[in-house]
Amino acid sequence: MPAAAARLRIEKLAQTDWPAKVGVVELAPNPVGAGRFGVFGADGKPVAFQTVWSAAGEPTRVCFDTSGGATVFYVCFGDNLPSASGSWKPEAGVLLETRACRADLPINTVQQIERVINTAGPAMGHDYVPNIFLGVNPFGPSSNYMAMFSGWFTAPAAGQYTFATASVDASSLEVDGRSVASWLGMHGAGGGTHGEHSGTITLAAGPHLLGYVQIQLGGVAAAVAAWKPPGRDQLAVMPATAFAPVARFRATRFEWASPGLERLYFEWNTVEQCALDESLFVRVQFRAVDNSERRTYRWHFDDGSEETGANVRHFFAAPGQRQVSVEALQNGVVVATNSVRVRVAPDWKEIQWWREGVFNQAKSDFLRRDLSPMPARDLVAVWEMADRADDPELVMGAGGILVQRQSEFNTPGYAAVFYKTGLAFEHQGDSGDTLAEKSLRLALSPQRASPATSDRAKLHLAALLIHCSGDLDEAAKMLGGISANLLNGDEKRLLRLLQGDLLLARGKTDDARKLYAAAGDRQAGAQPGVTRAARLESAAILIEHSRWDEAQAALDRLELDTPLERMLLDAELPALSLDMGRKEYRRAFTDGQALLAAAGDDPRQSEVLYTVIESGLALGKNEQAQRALERLLKDFPYSESAAKAKDRWSRK
């Protein structure tokens, strides 16, 4: 074995084509820097090889000569490595390369096809595939691309061979450089499934090179090469067995020979992803390939998180070039390390991009992490996916950090982010309402304010000020500043009803009642009383089962459709129970006091007083709670609420 800075042992996979005269392996970025590498046999003799694919942040794909039958090789890294003598051609397998192409060029003639080829973008990827049977671009988006196949097949006998193409959009097939079949223009695959676009050629027995080009502009992708060898009755898709086999190899051991701190070698591959619109979570598996000594491993990712273990899986909130570092430790001391710029990308072959199970795994992972040190682009990416997936828990997880780091998000584009974050925090206990208020204020700050969200943010902030903070003057100012031009029907109605809530909170009960009555009911159907009773019963059942969000939605809809419910204890007592169940003590205390003024002589005031006492004590408002207790015991001495209050709080 030649002297080298490091060497990598590679072995044939158990499940791969064999025997084969060509092998292929993926190499992580050179751990010794920009030095050369070479492939060698176990006897130290150089082996002929070629680089199939190399790109920044991606594994280098190498094919090499395995015609000698060996199943173990070494990749050596370093300068002045000997090379194999002679020329070698990897005449096996089917190589596929794809490139982005223009969608505005015609593809109806050979000359037009040549122009598309000549103006195509750089290669997206280059790898071996089983055969020419493609339904997706494995290296990038599956539209507006060109696929070029080059496959070595064996003609079992001399004679006439028929070849055919079936594709979506233009395709052409040639053998040994001679055009045999084509199907030009834009079209679906249906008109070629029975060999309508075929040609015949005379071949000698032995190896031949098949070239196939397909241009995919839109729709479902398809590129298929079929054949009919001598003695066959009909065309059939060329199977993988028709092509000379290529064996896959994998790294199993890495050895470092240079002085100084040892460098580690690691591999990675995308294992799964989930996507919604422009949001994409990608899960990547990393594997340390070491020298078999007993070590522990610690991984550092550029999103601020860490993992431990020789094999780890990590969710990235956004694709692209990402920095990944790993350390090997023995007895708690770092003995080897490496840091690589990794290109994180989706598995383009995946057909189902939105996978709820993967999203839930990613969500659990992100909520487990400390998101505080996460780079801004990743934090926003987590939030955007959560918003698109309509997942309030993850919206709050990422949104809470956005609020903490508000100074990094100071453009109008973030107004909607803080507005929606505020909505998610509403009704999540007192701390949630506090964060909701803060988020809505951030959405309204001068550097972020956006006409599309300002009125909505003011509407929800005013509601919080009325029902939680009790800051009625600011609430009035907020409501007065809403133009309502960009509000929808429900929001315009809520604006009017919040003005009634403001009157009620100020003790102007009659004025509030008139405003609610003027707004009118929107109940559909001929029996509004039955509808009302059903809604109230449904809300009560939901509260009993702690299904808070559904109960809130039911009560909100009832009060929006029937405004006078906002003054009636039939609806407001369940609302207070809901507030207490979610530990929204500020809302319960504020609304409870407003209700007492509107309750008249309803004996159920005792239940409201009990809630005011309980929420007031939780908030440290002991004097107000004591006054409410005295009133409860004085005015409703024989009520169930009074009995409970005596047991819990009375000093007598």
Image (spheres, helix red, strand yellow):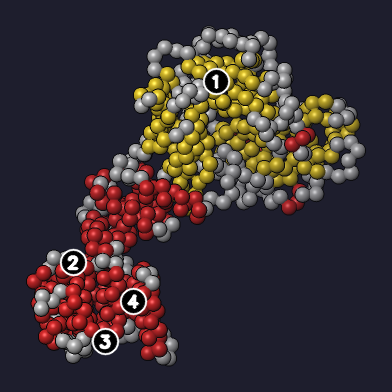
- Residues at marks 3 and 4, CA–CA distance in whole angstroms: 18 Å
Q: Residue at x 23, y 84 (%)?
A: 640
Q: Which mark is residue 555?
A: 4
**x and y percentages locating residue 289 in the rendered image:** 51, 26
- Residues at marks 3 and 2, CA–CA distance in whole angstroms: 35 Å
Q: Earlier in the sequence, mark 3 or mark 1?
A: 1
The residue mark sitting in front, 4 or 1, is: 1
Type of the residue with mark 2: Ala
**x and y percentages locating residue 531 in the rendered image:** 40, 86
Q: Which mark is residue 517?
A: 3
Q: Which mark is residue 113?
A: none
Type of the residue with mark 1: Leu
Q: Residue at x 16, y 66 (%)?
A: 619
**Whether residue 587 can be seen here:** yes
Q: Residues within 10 Å of mark 1 (few under 14, many from 20)?
A: many
- Residues at marks 3 and 1, CA–CA distance in whole angstroms: 81 Å
Do the residues under discs 4 and 1 have CB atoms within 8 angstroms?
Answer: no
* Secondary element at tag 3: helix
Type of the residue with mark 4: Leu
Residue at the far right in the pictured view? 231
Q: Residues within 10 Å of mark 3 (few under 14, many from 20)?
A: some
